[in-house]
Amino acid sequence: MTIWARLHITALAFWVGVMLFFSGLLAPIAFQTFPQAQAGDLMNKLFAPYHIVGYVCAGAALLTAWLAGGFRGKARNALLIVLLGATLYAGLVVSIEARALRVELRQTDTASPDPVTKARFDTLHRRAVTLNGAILIGALAALVWAVVSPPKSKTK
């Protein structure tokens, strides 16, 4: 196995680990421990670094897959491109808009939030959760694929 294939697996494993920790451990514990508003504020602060880890890991996985196998792994590269695109969309579009709506909701009377703003926030939150789950499943599939059949150059 080439160094690029090892780095590819490492990037995917780290990314999957961060997503599992964040979504499966940190977020649930935050919402069980703190009042909803405080837990939401905490998660809001953590989303930017969380997404940056996703951008770096997805980019590194794509780059190392390409360096390890070039254009031979078209399906693998396509999966990684889709995962990178979904991660960028989640972090640069959905998360930013949801964060702005959350701030707007916090500035209004909590007993009677604007129903349109609340509905839009809820829609974005569902989209973010769905995207995160899909990205996690895709990254996990890419990791299993890389372990079972590491990207390799044509010369091997």
Image (tube, grey):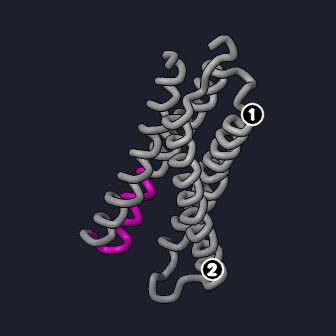
Q: Determine which quarter of the picture holds residue 40.
A: bottom left
Horizontally, residue 143 falls left or right of residue 28, namely right
Amino acid residing under circle 1: Lys
Amino acid residing under circle 2: Ala
Q: Determine which quarter of the picture holds residue 150.
A: top right
Horizontally, residue 69 falls left or right of residue 146, namely right
Q: Nearer the viewer, residue 75 or 21?
A: 75
**Residue 81 image position (x, y, % from top left):** 69, 39
Q: Residue at x 36, y 62 (%)?
A: 27
**Residue 52 image position (x, y, % from top left):** 51, 39
Q: Can residue 20 be found in the magenta stretch?
A: no
Secondary structure of residue under mark 1: helix
Q: Residue at x 56, y 68 (%)?
A: 125
Instruction: Tell me the CA gap for discs 1 and 2.
Output: 40 Å
Q: How many other residues sit within 10 Å of disc 1, few (<14), some (14-19) or many (≥20)? A: few
Secondary structure of residue under mark 2: helix
Q: How many other residues sit within 10 Å of disc 2, few (<14), some (14-19) or many (≥20)? A: few
Magenta residue span: 34-46
Q: Residue furthest top?
A: 155
| Disc number placed over residue 74 in the picture, else none | 1
N-terminal-most mark, 1 or 2: 1
Horizontally, residue 156 falls left or right of residue 147, namely right
| Disc number placed over residue 119 in the picture, else none | 2
Q: Nearer the viewer, residue 111 or 135?
A: 135
